Image (cartoon, helix red, strand yellow):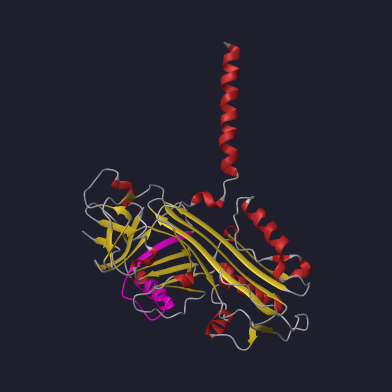
Amino acid sequence: MKRFFIAVVLLAVLAGLVVAVPMALRSHDDGFDDVGLLAADAEQLAATVVTPHLETPLEPDKSLLYCGTFQLAWNELCALIGGDVQFDPPGPEMVGVLNREAFTKDRLDADSYVAVADFVRNDPHGRIRRELDRKFGGAATPRFIPREELTPRPQDIVSYCYLLKTLEFEVPFERAEEPIRFSGAEVPGFGVSREYKPAHEKMYGQVRVLDYRGPDDFIVELLTKSEGDRLILAKIEPRQTLGAMVETVQERTAEAEPSPAGRGDVLRMPRLNFDLTRRYSELEGRRLVSSNPGVADDLILLSAVQNTRFQLDEKGVRLRSESHTSFGCGASPPPRVNRVMVFDGPFLILLQRAGASLPYFALWVDNPEILGAARGG
């Protein structure tokens, strides 16, 4: 009997180890699934624009996606060369906007990102991998660390940023049985249905109505387990830019009196699952101009890329984003690689740290292209 008891205890301990080890080494890829996934280069999308800053104008019938990783990599580059990034020939308008460094690291928690810029002589590729391993314990799954063969010289430059955010709901919402009609297309969704169920009580506690003026004009916050981050959804009239949309949300929520959702309230939100890569080809091929004598005068921007992996469903939000720039000698750039709250029309998604004045992620959805209308799931 004693041996049997010891054997049971050992089996329990071993079982705990078997479970604990994979959890400790869980890959960042494990938080995402492929159901309804849209994986594409941004240039392949006719109705979705990926932007590196919040000042990009909204266009009718086009979605607009922003994530702060390209800006953070740019900021590191500015710090490395000791001033603004300038090009010959001069770059597009986005260069001046990025040089203003509106989004900075203090709007994120240090545990969620890695941002590096350095000369190749200081081994930035190795430093990136070491920082990812130190911060994420080997679980990071980088796919867009720039290719080392692009920058073989000691004076070449690499900048990089990796961001990971996982915001889980304490209680998963319902997966909608019926699709949401969004701009004439049927898309999968989640939320809280009109027909009351006892399980809704915990879900209501996760829905904070920040400002409600009608079924086509409201702002809600979905509370997650991450107390330091906010998930805000706004179905409001579009403004000129994403930045103006953010300001409108901030102004309205500052003046309104929030209230929790309750029995009879309806929340329906499209599920999103996409993996979009944007190559900033309008920047590539330009020569870096710097008054810093320590910066070589023959550096060409060979690669400027941003990838955003985003998933929003009844379980919560998962966001992973990477960006990089590579400056090397003048080689040719590489080839291109009762209160009804139903989000059935254009809407805004913001992710930002509590107390921060700017979000680290913003998405204006104005058409069903990235909502999974044709992908199911």
Q: Residue at x 56, y 30 (%)?
A: 15
Q: Could you tell me residue 96's position as x and y percent?
A: 56, 84
Magenta segment includes 236 = yes
Q: Residue at x 59, y 55 (%)?
A: 141
Direction from residue 23 to residue 40 in the image, left or right? left
Direction from residue 225 to residue 186 in the image, left or right? left
Direction from residue 171 to residue 320 in the image, left or right? right
Magenta span: 229-252
Q: Could you tell me residue 342's position as x and y percent?
A: 27, 61
Locate the N terminus and report the quarter of the image it occupies. top right
- Residue 182 visible at all: yes
Above/below status of 327 relative to 110: below
- Residue 357 visible at all: no
Magenta segment includes 280 = no
Q: Could you tell me residue 250's position as x and y percent?
A: 40, 72
Q: Answer with the quarter of the image where residue 21 lies.
A: top right
Q: Answer with the quarter of the image where residue 88 lies.
A: bottom right
Above/below status of 23 relative to 288: above
> How many marks do you count on the picture?
0
Direction from residue 141 to residue 184 in the image, left or right? left
Front residue (pair 355, 271): 271
